[in-house]
Amino acid sequence: MKLSVWTYEGPPHVGAMRVATAMNGLHYVLHAPQGDTYADLLFTMIERRNHRPPVTYTTFQARDLGSDTAKLFRDACQAAYERFKPQAMIVGASCTAELIQDDPGGLGAALGLPIPVIPLELPSYQRKENFGADETFLQIVRTLAKPTDRSARVSCNLIGPTALGFRHRDDITEITALLNDMGVEVNVTAPYGATPADITRLGTAHFNALMYPETGESACRWMERTLGQPYTRTIPIGVGATKDFVEEVAALTGCEPRLDSDRLRLPWYSASVDSTYLTGKRVFIFGDGTHVATATRIAREEMGFEVVGIGCFNREMARPIRALAKDIGVEALISDDYLEVEARISNLAPELILGTQMERHIGKRLGIPCAVISAPVHVQDFPARYSPQMGVEGANVIFDTWVHPLVMGLEEHLLHMFREDPEFNDAAGPSHHAHGAKQVSDAPDPVGAQIIWLDEAERELRKVPFFVRGKARRNTEAFAEARGDSQISVETLYEAKAHYAR
Ligand code: SF4
């Protein structure tokens, strides 16, 4: 048992739903107790889809457990087939149904329906949503994709975008245009918008562009082995990564590495003098592995931030994130426990958090600005406007999104210089945010609680700009503690400063 208040990922059958809902002409029959239909709301409310997900639930109740739940499942499959006439069906169990072991796969196959019925084995107690999506898509591809002749023109498949994916809708548009500019056609985008018939045509493409490893890598590996299609390893989020992606596609296809960067504004915006105050801003980055890795590169190479910590919640990406953390000299946090994430953030006291919806809450509590870079996200991150993360326009969107929560340069000066001013004081926070928003917490933390700050030292600490004051307080306390001091004087404060500056 593990006490959980927030979870970064849902159970694996939600991943399967994300694939089914992304596709057309595919139906999912899910053996699940009454009440599991809550998952529909993810798609109809958060993603604001205008139709129900193509999912039939058996919705068994307590009284059904005494009778034949397997029959319930068979009937649900039959009824779903007759009502929706899908081109293919996936069948599986939710967490509760996994315990009653009705074998949905075997039952579905035994019905003898005239369409492919694809069984899903999703271990709900060991794995999570992203695994569910990746595995479901793999099984669909394995069942339906067949070796075929390659298209006459160079073409590729876009692999990995799903329903409920963070900015998947607009990333597809951006990457399709980018590939078209190079003379590469998109054969099939899957699972997003694909039908089972489209899946049978995957083999026509010359290569696969893997957009999201979390939800598409297994299928890409299978296609590489079975259909002989190579796949791209660079995720084109950020200016450098987009350029590398273009080079990678060029190397795979022999096309010109052409990138239309007329609309690309991030490099100039971040080099322009107004962005000087961004240099060295201390950021903490958390989310799914792919978005964290790409954000880390942008933060360091394109925005001039100092990355003080990174981490991801999906264990499937633990290895690359650990390696990246080692490369940049920070500690990786691989955890799906938001309390651990909160503790790490509080400890590092960054000036900006790049994270998920959870980190927004953490940031709010600690008074640290936050921008969202990864799922899980709330309804506001399925915006009406065009907002990709990938490619040229994605880089522009990222620049605006990350800078927005920060206090602007001039305001930062004013807040620091006139800290007694009724308007521009430390507690006022950025003028474009809610009035009276709390700024970076510099309250003593429990570790330092036994160490006493002398009045004069406390007054001196208040001269440190608010956004780094929390960090200065913690560093000084750690320094005093290491020396065995029980009091902090102005001298201790300056000795600590000199010590950390070394
Ligand atoms: S089956 Fe799983 S998802 Fe559904 S209510 Fe039970 S624990 Fe939650």
Image: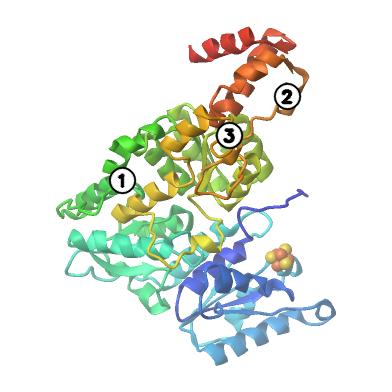
Residue at image coords 76%, 23%: 449
Residue 143 visible in this rendered orientation of the protein: yes
User: Which picture quadrant has residue 362?
Assistant: top right
Callouts 3 and 1 close, C-beta under 8 Å: no
Q: Which residue matches tag 1?
A: 266
Q: Position of residue 133 (x, y in %)?
A: 52, 62
Query: What mark, if any, has residue 426 been given in the picture?
Result: 3
Mark 3 vs mark 2, foreground winner is 3
Residue at image coords 53%, 27%: 465
Q: Is residue 224 left or right of residue 324?
A: left
Residue 323 visible in this rendered orientation of the protein: no
Residue at image coords 78%, 19%: 450
Q: Amino acid at mark 1?
A: Leu
Query: What mark, if any, has residue 324 been given in the picture?
Result: none
Q: Which residue matches tag 2?
A: 447
How did the renderer colour the structure? rainbow
> Who comes first in sequence, dot 3 or dot 2?
3
**SS for dot 2:** helix
Q: Position of residue 292 (x, y in %)?
A: 47, 44
Up the image or down, 472 lies above or below 431; here it is above
> Who comes first in sequence, dot 3 or dot 1?
1
Q: Amino acid at mark 3?
A: Asp
Residue at image coords 42%, 36%: 410
Q: Position of residue 23 (x, y in %)?
A: 45, 74
Up the image or down, 26 lies above or below 389; here it is below
The front one of 437 and 397 is 437
